[in-house]
Image (tube, grey):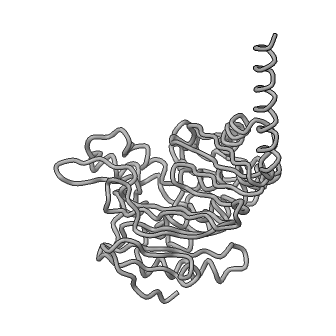
Amino acid sequence: MKKWCKKTGLLCLLFATALVLCSCQKPSDIKKEASAWAYDTFCSVTVYGYNGEDLQAYFETQLQEGQMLFSPDAQGRVFAQTDGQVLAFQNMREARLMEMAWQLSSWTDGAFDLTVAPLSALWNVSGADRPPEEQAIADALSLVGYQTVACTEEALRFSHVGQGLDLGAFGKGNGGDLVADRLQTGGALGGMVDLGGNITLFGSKPDGSLFRIGVRDPADDGGGVLGILNLTDTSVVTSGGYERYFEYEGVRYHHILDPRTGWPAESDLLSATVVCSDGALADMLSTACFLLGEERALALLQTVNASDKWDNAQAILVLRTGEVVVTSGLSQRFSLTSSAYRLKESPL
């Protein structure tokens, strides 16, 4: 009987201690994490002050919802099965994304172009071991061109069978927006959504500090960083040739294809990081900037920021010369930490 009493007393003491510890932890301090595989990459979320339904299940549900936009195939592509096929927008979000994509295509003279799908399917960089034949590239290139696809407020109309959209240009950026919006609606006070390196930040950390985001060093295959961003309530997206590639006869072929040439993009940039409160726009702009190179990328950002339709966008451009261009809106938010690079003054 005495042994039982001692054990009961110990259990009561432990329980009371747990209650005291829990009562000292404010709801906003509670940190939860979840992870899942989506968008053909590893995705994770870290959230503070979330007391809603099971975070893991909730995260997976929201990731699935984001991937359902336009009902793409497993590679995130949609292809026309007949000449003149119409792709009707299912909601305002799809219509807005297409309007944004077609506007950027116009502003970049087709350097950015969602209709690159026939080329990306041909190259299949993730599983390829050599470049496609020249004639195959020419055939795929004949199906590429945003000008040949009619875009209205309600739908897209393809001209020819085989044309298609590569939704990878905004899929993760849009997905991050969706997850962050749903978490905030569900009561979360702050957090970070990471969809394969596409970062969406919202709210605040328990101590009120900003989130620290590392900007990857594109020349470091080990994943090192060249600098740190301190941010919140925004998205951070980087595009670079180091992400997915294969090598053939000593040449590296990466996954960001130039719709004008049919080959992997070549510019004076090693990577382009875009910071914007609209994750889908940040995603598209990072690809566009990488394709355009420093001068035209800065001109594009200036055009976007002058428009009253789009959110303000800032960038960090890493040049092949080892210089790093940081636009003025990030100058107080970014710290260069690698001695291998040097800052270059930005005109924007």
The vertical placement of 307 against 275, above or below, is below
| Residue situated furthest top in the rendering | 1
Image quadrant assignment for residue 184? bottom right
In depth, the one of 76 and 196 nearer the eye is 196
| Residue situated furthest front in the rendering | 2
Image quadrant assignment for residue 147? bottom right
In depth, the one of 216 and 113 nearer the eye is 216
Question: What's the residue at 61%, 77% (across, down)?
Answer: 304
Residue 259 relative to residue 113: left or right: left
Question: What's the residue at 59%, 45% (across, down)?
Answer: 44
Quadrant, the N terminus: top right
Estimate the x, y position of residue 67 in percent, counting from the top left: 64, 42
Estimate the x, y position of residue 38 in percent, counting from the top left: 57, 39
How many labels were placed on the picture?
Answer: 0
Estimate the x, y position of residue 49 in percent, counting from the top left: 77, 51
- Regarding residue 299, the answer to whether it shows in the image is yes
In depth, the one of 13 and 68 nearer the eye is 13
Question: What's the residue at 69%, 48% (across, down)?
Answer: 31
Image quadrant assignment for residue 309? bottom right
- Regarding residue 165, the answer to whether it shows in the image is no
Estimate the x, y position of residue 70 in percent, counting from the top left: 66, 45
In depth, the one of 227 and 98 nearer the eye is 227
